[in-house]
Amino acid sequence: MSLLWQARFFTTVNHLRDLPNTQVPEIAFAGRSNAGKSTAINILCNQKRLAFASKTPGRTQHINYFSIGGAHVGQHRKDPTKVDEITALLVDLPGYGYAEVPGEAKNHWNELLGTYIQQREQLAALVLIMDARRPFTELDVQMLEWFAPTGKPVHCLLTKADKLNRNESTNALRQARTVLQSYADEEGQAFPFSVQLFSALKRVGLDEANDRILDLLGLSDSSAAVDDGDQ
Ligand code: GDP
């Protein structure tokens, strides 16, 4: 059983000023709408409807927070979460790329998402969800470019890998690595970007994604061991 299975709804935010005043590390999931973000979050958290797939552009402008810790898995969903026992937060960012979103909503998206990912101190890392058949769309690249200067890690999930055959999967992974390695800082150092194949349908890459997310949150066995060593 993974710690991620403890995830439960914490809060919804529509304005930067409403971001929770928590100090625990958070990891954000970003992606083009329909890339499979909700499905990935739900399967990683072993829940059917934690993250809602939304097909309505108006509903995509919210940031949804899920907490890890502070509530028992079997606990009644209406029982309050003990905020001081929360160990980490998962953050479901609004899906982007709806063609029909009007200019005003796009500006709201830019400000909410851009400012959040560039300035949120508690944000430990970004999980970028991309359809393995068409990764690195313009807005995915925008997310990478916004985030790169923070120096924090990005882990990419190439979703719906079941739609590719073995050769295509290998190529998609190799090409994605090449794109990610092309990002370097002014001294030529590569950014901490990683990528893997993922399929919720065929349960491909679940363990790898789970381990990476816990590690980035400092919740994995190995990161706990490192913490102990520091004391
Ligand atoms: P979101 O808009 O990024 O949250 O995307 P959803 O999670 O709602 O998924 C969009 C569509 O892709 C839905 O029809 C899902 O059933 C489908 N989907 C998600 N993950 C997979 C997968 O691993 N394999 C396949 N074949 N389809 C998937």
Image (cartoon, rainbow, N blue to C red):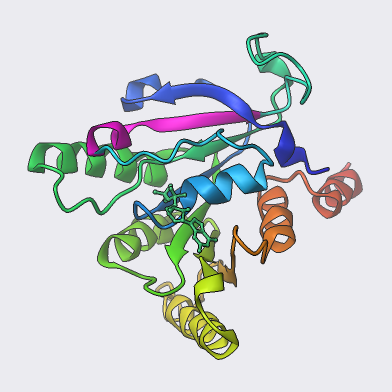
Question: Most extreme residue toward the top, as rendered?
Answer: 79
Q: Residue at x 73, y 19 (%)?
A: 71
The x and y percentages for residue 192 are 56, 66
Question: Most extreme residue toward the left, as rendered?
Answer: 103
Number of marks: 0
Quarter placement of the C terminus? top right
Read off the magenta span: 57-67
**Residue 31 colored magenta?**
no
In the visual, does 108 lie left or right of 122? Answer: left
| Residue 143 shows in the view | yes
The x and y percentages for residue 87 are 71, 30
**Residue 58 colored magenta?**
yes
In the visual, does 35 lie left or right of 222? Answer: left
| Residue 19 shows in the view | no
In the visual, does 116 lie left or right of 208? Answer: left
Q: Nearer the viewer, residue 64 or 183?
A: 64
Q: Nearer the viewer, residue 86 or 174?
A: 174
Q: Residue at x 79, y 22 (%)?
A: 74
Q: Nearer the viewer, residue 8 or 63?
A: 8
The x and y percentages for residue 123 are 52, 42
Q: Nearer the viewer, residue 102 or 195?
A: 102
Q: Residue at x 35, y 46 (%)?
A: 95
User: Would you identify the image quadrant in which residue 206 lies?
Assistant: bottom right
The x and y percentages for residue 1 are 83, 43
Image height of 137 relative to 70, above or below: below
User: Would you identify the image quadrant in which residue 195 lies?
Assistant: bottom right
Image height of 151 relative to 27, above or below: below
